[in-house]
Image: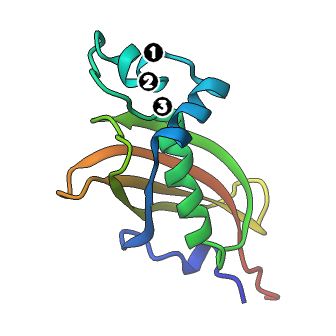
Amino acid sequence: MKRMLDDLPLGETFSCGSFALNDEEIVDFATRFDPQPWHLSDELAAPTYFQTLCASGVHSQAMAIGLMVRAITDVDVVAGGSLNQAKFFTPVRPGTEYAVSAVWTEARPSTSNPTRGVATIDITAHDPQGAVVMACGVTYIVGRRVSDT
């Protein structure tokens, strides 16, 4: 049975797993979606702020959100509503493993549909030293139980 809006453990952080990207994955994503020099090669990145190859923020965000989505398959998610405040603190580098965690931060009933609610989840990716490298939030439409009373 799927967890509903009222079942979400607000404020409880949970692990979503981890990801690591290699050079080829970073360059492939960048070539297709974010072809800035620091995402294409060490050589092109050398004269930039980043100095060496790093992943696109959008790529890093997609990796973290993918892990989070897999971690909440037991929740009755009806649809996504918004992505919230993506922040990138330090570059995601090839060969480094990043741990992803999430926390449900808000859950409120819909004002227009009693069978649904709105829930927000905050996601963070941490480097091996525990520093936050990326954070974002997702707001979902989530199912609610409707009583027969």
Q: Depth check: 9 or 133 in front? A: 133
The quadrant of the image that shows the N terminus is: bottom right
Q: Depth check: 113 or 36 in front? A: 36
Nearer mark to the viewer, of 1 and 3: 1
Query: At numbered mark 1, what does the secondary structure look like: helix, strand or loop?
Result: helix
Query: What is the quadrant of residue 146 in the picture?
Result: bottom right
The residue positioned 44% from the left and 35% from the top of the image is 55
Residue that carries the numbered disc 2 in the rendered image: 41
Residue that carries the numbered disc 1 in the rendered image: 37
Query: At numbered mark 2, what does the secondary structure look like: helix, strand or loop?
Result: loop
Q: CA distance from mark 2 to mark 3?
A: 12 Å
Q: Amino acid at mark 3?
A: Ser
Q: Amino acid at mark 2?
A: Ser
Q: Earlier in the sequence, mark 1 or mark 3?
A: 1
Q: Where is residue 118? Give x, y as percent.
A: 63, 57
Residue that carries the numbered disc 3 in the rendered image: 56
Q: CA distance from mark 1 to mark 3?
A: 10 Å
